[in-house]
Amino acid sequence: MDLWKILLLGAVVVGLVLLLQMGSRPVAVPEPLPGSLVEQGTFAIEQAGQRVGEEAFTVWLVEVGFRVDSEVRLTVSGQTVELAAELLLSPDWAPLAYTLVVQAPHGKQRVAARIAGEKVTFEAVAGLARQDRELTGTPPFAVLDNNVIGHWHALHRFLRAAGRTGETQGTALIPQAFAALPFRTQPPEPVGLKVGERTLPAERYRVQLADQEVWLYGQGELLLGVVFPAQLAVAYLEEVLPDGLIVVEPVPSH
């Protein structure tokens, strides 16, 4: 089983589709828009209880809204893959544009998406080859591409900003697969997260993505962890949860 099928962290249903054969021509990472730093941190990534990588992310306040940058390094079965992602969002955390550069042992690939109203444009470039696709979907949209935890950070912020008390339904965009899937979430439920000898009060959002579920753990606007139960995959914010994502249920009374 190859590296991407083992991880399946972002596109938990369709997996990674290598759209094009990799060429030798490098794809440059686009220059980020200027902005003011809002937040930064490191997600540790585990698969079946073993650490397989980490992601350094930053959140920026920019003229159009927000930008989430992610630099990911994953190593499984001796193979290392590096990803650099940039997700541009509106002030209410709805995605506007997305770029991902994947550096794998077999070459480099650039994938991009643009969202305008109900229209989504995908693009993949590898060497001299290029492939495009357009589709329409029902907003709100969420970009949930392979192996980038920062995208779930953006969805978590969107759910918080929306202040919804009922079910949220929308469309998840999977740019590496040129695909769109329905998603829905329920209002958050209280949980506790173990940090040393104390319990940190937190919330859990259950995100239904097609026929699979993903759990988002956060406190306020801060995303603390993501769990992909079907893939035995976990990511957690090291600066707050140095011992990993340890959930306490029910929440102890104070």
Image: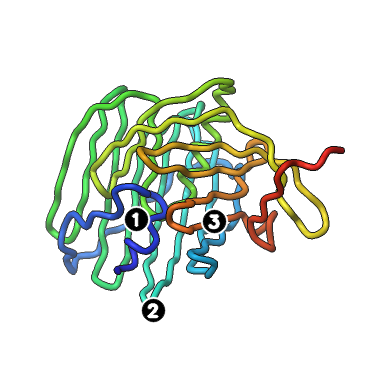
Q: Is residue 39 above or below residue 129?
A: above
- Which residue in the rendered view is the most extreme toward the front? 250
- Which residue in the rendered view is the most extreme toward the left? 129
Q: Which part of the image, by quadrant, shows the N terminus?
A: bottom left
**Three-letter code, disc 2:** Gly
**Three-letter code, disc 1:** Val
Q: Is residue 142 above or below residue 240?
A: above
Q: CA distance from mark 1 to mark 2?
A: 25 Å
Q: Residue at x 15, y 62 (%)?
A: 21
Instruction: Check residue 78 in the rendering and tell me which mark sits there, or answer none.
Output: 2
Q: Position of residue 75 (x, y in %)?
A: 42, 71
- Judged left or right of residue 94, residue 188 is right
Task: Say whether disc 1 or disc 2 marks the residue closer to the N-terminus.
Answer: 1
Secondary structure state at the residue bearing disc 2: loop
Given residues 126 and 202, the one toward you in this image is 202
The residue tagged 3 is 235
The residue tagged 1 is 29
**Three-letter code, disc 3:** Ala
